[in-house]
Amino acid sequence: MKLALADHLIVAPVLLPLAASALMLLFDERQRKAKSFVSLLTVLALLAVALILFQRVVSAGFDGGPAASAYHLGNWPAPFGIVLVVDWLSGLMLLVTSILAVTSLVYSLSRWERAGPRFHALFLLQLMGLNGAFLTGDIFNLFVFFEVLLAASYGLLLHGSGPARVKAGLHYVSINIMTSLLFLIGAGMIYGVTGTLNMADLALRIPLVQGADLALLQSGIAVLGVAFLVKAGMWPLGFWLPATYAAAVPPVAALFAILSKVGIYALMRVYLLLFGGKVGWTANFGEEWLLYGGLATMAFGTIGLLAARTLSRLAGYSVIVSSGTLLASLGVGQGAVLAGALFYLVSSTLGLSAFYLLLELIERRDTDPGVRAVVEPVFEDEDTDALEEGESEVGVVIPVTIAILGGGFLFCALLLAGMPPLSGFVAKFAIMHGVMGLGRDISAAAWTLVALLIISGLATIVATSRAGIDLIWTPSDRPQPVLRLWEAIPVGLLLLICLGLMIFAGPVMRYMERTGRSLQDRDGYIHAVLPAESMAHRESQP
Amino acid sequence: MKRWIPYPLLAASLLLMWVLLTQSPSIGQLVLGSAVALLATWAMTALRPERVKIRSLRPVMRLVGIVIIDIVRSNIAVARIILLPPRNRISDFVSLPLDLRDPHGLAVLALIITATPGTMWIHFDRTKETLLVHVLDLVDREAWIELIKGRYEALLLEIFDQ
Amino acid sequence: MEAVLAIAIGVLTASGVWLILRPRTFQVIIGLSLVSYAVNLFIYAMGRLRVDAPALTGAEQAGAASLSDPVPQALVLTAIVISFAMTALMLVVLLAARGLTGTDHVDGEDGE
Amino acid sequence: MWAILLLPFAGSLAAALLPTTSRNAAALLAGAIALLCVGSLAMLYPAVAGGDAIRSELEWMPAFGLDLLIRLDGLTWVFAFLVLAIGFLVVLYARYYMATEDPVPRFFSFLLAFMGSMLGLVLSGNLIQLVFFWELTSLFSFLLIGYWHHNESARSGARIALLVTAAGGMCLLVGVLLIGRIVGSYDLDAVLAAADRIKGSALYLPALIFILIGAFTKSAQFPFHFWLPHAMGAPTPVSAYLHSATMVKAGIFVLIRLWPVLAGTDAWYLIVTTTGLATLLVGAWAAIFQQDLKGLLAYSTISHLGLITLLLGLGSPLAAVAAIFHTLNHATFKASLFMAVGIVDHETGTRDLRRLSGLYRFMPFTATLAMVAAAAMAGVPLLNGFLSKEMFLAEALENHRGTIIDEALPFIATTALALSVLYSVRFIHQGFFGPAPTGLPREPHEAPFWMRLPVEVLVLACLVVGIMPSVTIGPFLHMAVESVLGDATPRYSLAIWHGFTRPLALSVAALIFGGVGYAIFRDRLNAFTAVPLMGRLKGRRSFEVVLALIVSGARRLLALTGTGKLQPQLRLLVIIACLAGLLPFLRYGYEPGDRPGVLVDPGFALIWLVGCLCAIGAAWQAKFHRYAALILMAGAGLASCVSFVWLSAPDLALTQLLVEGVTTVLLLLGLRWLPQRHPEMLPRTRRLSPYRLRRGFDLGIAIAAGAGIALLSYAVMTRPLPNSIAGFFLENAYPGGGGKNVVNVILVDFRAFDTLGEITVLATVGLTVFSLLRRFRPAVESVRAPEQQRVQNAFDDRSEGREVGDTRADYLAIPRIIMQWLSPVILVFAVYLLVRGHDLPGGGFAAGVTMTLALLLQYMAFGTRGVEARLRVRPMSWVGLGLLIAVATGAGAWLFGYPFLTSAFGYADILVIGKVPLASALLFDVGVFLVVIGATALILTVLAHQSIRTPLTRPRSDAEPEAGEL
Amino acid sequence: MTTLMLALAITAAQILLGLAMLCTAYRILTGPRAQDRVLALDTFYVNAMLLLLTFGVQTGRTVYFEAALIIALLGFVGTVALAKFLMRGEVIE
Amino acid sequence: MIQAPDLPLWAAIIVAFLIFSGAAMTLIGSIGLLRLRTFYERVHAPTLGTSFGTLLICLASVVCFSVLRSRPSVHEILIVVFITLTAPVSFMLLGRAALYRDRIEGNPEVPPQAQ
Ligand code: NA
Ligand code: NA
């Protein structure tokens, strides 16, 4: 099958960062300017590609056409070759990723890229991993991209070195290696029982598994699910998350905001695709685990929010709460919640990212010189690329620094707490509307979800108001934080997008609803991936 | 010639190795093998090995023959030592002075001594020019020294230029 | 054969898991390696066992069904590479942790 | 209409952007906007007066039944008018109240935003929208209360207000969602039309409770009232605005708005009446003991809010009318009182009743105004407060439900009103009469005209309404009442004189009791520093204690439910994974399949006997004998390599064998930086039982995990193979992929994308390792050269004729020759593996690792410096190049219009050589090859480089003389 | 018959090699010294290589040859590193 | 798996003999690893496997595949060559390291280093 040039765009989100980072490896380590430039260019191109792909999904999907389109790598037919699929969900995730990429990168350019070597290559590889994970339609390829994104995240987490990062890194690496092994076990068993790795093909084959094979298949899927849940940070598998995110340098943590969502994405993708059929045993498989796990995660995150002593921990537990909310929303098993959950996903990801960018600016005043000493060169041959040297530290001191920081903080807090005027409120409303709006009775679990949504929002207010008042309102003799324009702009941009999400909640929600529906009605995806005759063939089987 | 094929013997051996590996002496493989062998020899020049100074290749066959015989003999001897019940056997280190200086010659000697069961090259002290060998069944210290110096070193001295 | 391999996988896993649960970083890295061995064998086993049937075809196609399943093998190859990479990474991180925290305890603090 | 809503927000934004010094501009802007809005609202009056609601809709989230909807009816109009008119007066007042150096644009910005939110709230025609603005009022009130955030009281007051009201807002949201669920719409008109459905629904009670919590928190009803007095840290204009017409009235507004659909049930009656009653009493009781004028007003506000709530709770239409009326009256007199107190504070520098006295002679105008307003608050005839109070008393005397509340209501009402009289009298008498004050922070004098003007306007309103109610407030009240009650609007009269009625009697009694009470207790009241009976129940303290408890509880709970340690996390992970894998078998049972097994080979079994022994040994030794554990691990690895060969997976065996070698070297490289561990280092306490218990438990987990995975694999292996995708690969590898080695064709063609990802992982890890080791800080003990080197170098140094390093040179002299000559051999072998990989076991990865091993041998033989003096080792570039080749090969397919990684192969007929198979996949494999060499070499050499780096802190002490024989 | 004889001989050889590996395993496990373990590991590698060769003869396939060749050519890399670590305290100086 | 390639009797006998004796030789070497007393004695034992064991089994392979394919198959010689080149390197390095370790511990069985 010959393709037009534009059709190859689907693979660009993976190849572009890969090629750019490969190119950077050929550069000398000192050519920072050039690397920053290439990096920025790549990220902007990624944003453009994501927008185009998104636009395609939107225009095709809302016209009633097939929103999902598949790219058969190597020109091998599915389910044999690997496919990349852009559909409602992956298009959205790509877009969110590239937005975060742009903001985090711009933010890092003013300072953080210099905290260690090879930042840009790692950053781009991280993007490649994320994009690949969102695009792939193959379960083992998903593993590979998980590894790519994890490998890059290890590098980025450790960027800047220092005891806190290294210790967090050790935990993060150990847990994730173990998790990857679980992923392999799960994926292996799924292949062992079904004989395929393509997700669409699996969706067709899984309902046909019968008898004693069922236990094996479910066992494999459950193990795989555990792997996803670790990434998503579900209680009690997500204790690593706040510490890890807190240790990372701000632009990295800001990009990591999407990392925990990869686990959620994988759950949505795999579980809804494989078990969305509502046929036989696949109906509602594992739902209650997601639900109760999600609720427990929300509760744990809430406790953490209240207990957090630093802003970065607070943000970490917000990530947990957000994960828990999404898991529980997935678990309540009501389609109407999906749209709200997706909206929430986008909104909370952007909000958390902004929060991570911001909190360092706020806490910057407390920079402890002792911390820096540890990461100073140890050996004589280090080249002098430490944070301060060479470049002027005098930024554009905006006279209203505090006002901007305070305002930004306030908006982030509101966003995370689910208060107006930003999109957090709409997201929370949409989830609650979904949870309460359906079914004959509101189940106890639904009530709990609502209660936890409220309580976690309150806890966010309690915690952020305490921290915000301490850091911004309380007079102190700390020096005025130095805020650079290019650090403020990304935060503002993210918040602006959240405001936009709120204002244009109608169309956005329409998209989310279509996304939610497409996840439940899997045919669009399967049709896009598998050739028609194989569908027909499979469907004719008992 | 020297410039293009710095180590003709090496190149030839590598080509032979290629043919053995591919198990097909077709022209195609020969050409490819030659190319690879050349590539490898060039790579070798980059490593700048010490020059191999060979005086004569004639004693090589004799050396090989001796070594094979010794290996067979000592294999049996060592097997007996292992299998038979322990007797009063002395195994000890033997230190002997060497006249061989050429590193490649020494390397071959080391290979021979170590590959032969029952003797073991431990250490060559270049300052004192003495070799330390461990012998499993040391009946007669002098006999062993004579064996090494007379049987192997002498031949090697003939082969390698000093 | 199946039983032997299953037991082998089990023993490797058990040893590895036991090490992973130990408090010293080096134990953890050895444990992860052992579990990786086990997982590689496990994935391989998902294609069922076949002796003397490597997945080599050719113009003179043997019956495809009689060959061993190449898919898990390809997956294991990828997994081997990745687990090697992860071992390297883990090692370096543990060295860094050892240097920065002054102990090889996984939590950076001594005392069991 | 949208303009009315948007203007304040736009103004807020504009004010925020003004320079901090432009107080006049900001005030002018705020005032103009308020006036403009009042004007527009007035123009809408005729349309509303007709009794119909004006609706204006903007699509927002139609899918959720959520559209932006402005709905203007009588009630809304009146409330909006209050918000805007009092807002205007507050702006005027604030202009003169706020200090010159205060950066007021921010203040006016918040004030305008608050005004907008409040307007949005009352104008909402949609319940969700209402909640939206409701939360915004919480937010902006927080900012306003905390405006003087350098004061601790302002900060904590703001935070308390925020927490309480935001929490209430979230409850309100739930309640509203429930209403939406019952009604099927959030549209206010739809909701109001569905009164019966709501009251009959099973969800009525939860909805009611949630909505009431929301309303009560906002309107400072007992027991949520405590935030209000603490909000007094706000600038007085803010208090005047928030606590008269706006913030606290939001709750009342919601109660009134939803009165038709929620009121009239027993639950409503019981909850609302009781709460109102309690609030009425508590507020009034606390107010009389206040020494701070603003505190007095705050509690009086609480009390009056309780009164209104009580009225609404009664459920009768007349009571509702009274409630609405009193809401309006309270807004006017309370706003003016706050402003008057503000003037007093402003001009004297204190608000302490005990210090103030005789101010009348200094500020007669203000005093008069305050007196009139206080009289209105006390319910003195000819003032507006009197009218609504009479209505209240009349309702109090009515029998509503025949409960005990009904019986007691007249007495309680009278008592509360008497208290109200008492604190009003106390306020006026103590503040404005008596001897001249002494020791005030400032010399008191009359306030400027413009500052008094707002008070005068409000007081005038009190008077006019009080004297001529039906002419002035009548139509508006009627309009508001009708919009709420509709057809149920009762007949009521706004006359000043209804004759000698029972309510009048109670009213008079209250006035007398209040006056007498003040006369008796005035001095004693001044002595109180806390409110008797309620003193212990300090709202803020207990709130903060509760918060602190929550936080410390959360910390304890967090420690209990979470962990920062790695072992417990891994333990949990393993346990959960085991359980997850196990659960399905509990349901379906475990049974091995019936596929005929492969006969056991003794060699294979023995290999694994050894392998298992090694694995267990590694587990046993890893703690103290790292080196031994490493060897044991390699043994186990070798067993799996051999079994891959045995089980027809030669590619895996090759790869794993090669990786084994590299891994061993890698771990050894690392081991150099890990200081020794000895069993002696263990303290004896390790033998304690919890430690053993944990080990036992871990052993159990390990065995369970092992057994579990063994059983799983056995079950799968004994089952017949499903109809898998493998068949396609086996059939198409040669015809479609041009390779006979199916595994390799999968790797470089069918699933080349996996391989691309995999080499990316390798490259990324290389980068990470590189980055991390650039700042490597070795453990203190291992900075020095290893002990062996120190000893050997010392020996060399000591010995005659030897130089430092000779031992090493001697050691490696012979092996290094062999290792060097082997490198071209290994290179040829690597190329062989690469070239043949497509048809036979091998491939780019195996070839790459082989090359790395050759390189490693050189490094081991010649040392880092030795090798790098000879070779240009630039692994980073190799990685980059390899990745680019792989990507470019894949992208080459685009030129032909095929997807990425589409392979091409053919047979090139080259002269002499004959047919040579060429596949683009081979080029891809070359990329893999390069990346693998680059990345593995990068990792290993970067590690190796650590040894030759010179630490900044400590000179390298190779030649350190140390005792020891060699 | 011929085949059976050969098969039995090969299997017997494999068993012998397996037993040889068991011997090496004993040394790997018990040492006593580090050098004993290394030596035993090296021997284990050689034994495994020979086992692979017998397997190749048994199956009549040459595809397993490269695995044996890798052990022969590169199996010693690990041993060299281990030995050098013992002698010098670090693998690459 | 009891199987073997289909060889003529003479070849089968040769192969069987070579393979069995090679394995036996190797086993003897490994037994030596068990039985011999000191490390320096034990270090001799594996050479049985690397020399005779390998040689015999490779010869078996040569015979087997040459007969099977009816053309000379001598690539096994590479294994013999490689193992002969590489095994001594390991043993030498290991032996010297052991010597150092024994000397540093003052083991009387090893000769002291001459200054
Ligand atoms: Na970092
Ligand atoms: Na391959």
Image (spheres, coloured by chain):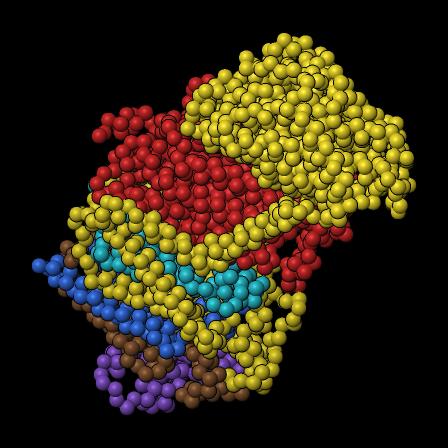
Q: Is residue D226 visible?
A: yes
**Chain F on-screen colour:** brown
Q: Residue drawn at (47%, 80%), measured in percent from left and top?
A: F100
Question: As displayed, is residue D715 above or below residue D393?
Answer: below
Q: Residue drawn at (59%, 59%), measured in percent from left and top?
A: A163
Instruction: Give the side of residue C21 with respect to residue A111, left or right.
Output: left
Residue nearest the observer in this picture, A237 or B126 = A237
Q: Which chain is purple?
A: B
Q: Residue drawn at (63%, 72%), measured in percent from left and top?
A: D956
- Identify the image quadrant of residue E19: bottom left
Question: As displayed, is residue A293 above or below residue F35?
Answer: above
Question: As displayed, is residue D816 above or below residue D285?
Answer: below
Residue nearest the observer in this picture, D61 or D959 = D61
Instruction: Give the side of residue B154 with respect to residue E18, left or right.
Output: right
Q: Residue drawn at (83%, 45%), measured in percent from left and top?
A: D355
* Residue at far left of view: E1
| Relative image position of residue D377 (x, y in whole percent) | 73, 29
Instruction: Report the label total.
Output: 0
- Identify the image quadrant of residue E67: bottom left
**Chain A on-screen colour:** red
**Chain D on-screen colour:** yellow
- Identify the image quadrant of residue D188: top right
Residue nearest the observer in this picture, A319 or D533 = D533
Which quadrant is the N terminus of chain D positioned in? Answer: top right
| Relative image position of residue F3 (x, y in whole percent) | 16, 56
Instruction: Give the side of residue A132 with respect to residue B71, left or right.
Output: right
**Chain C on-screen colour:** cyan
**Chain E on-screen colour:** blue
| Relative image position of residue D407 (x, y in whole percent) | 54, 31
Question: As displayed, is residue D666 above or below residue D394?
Answer: below
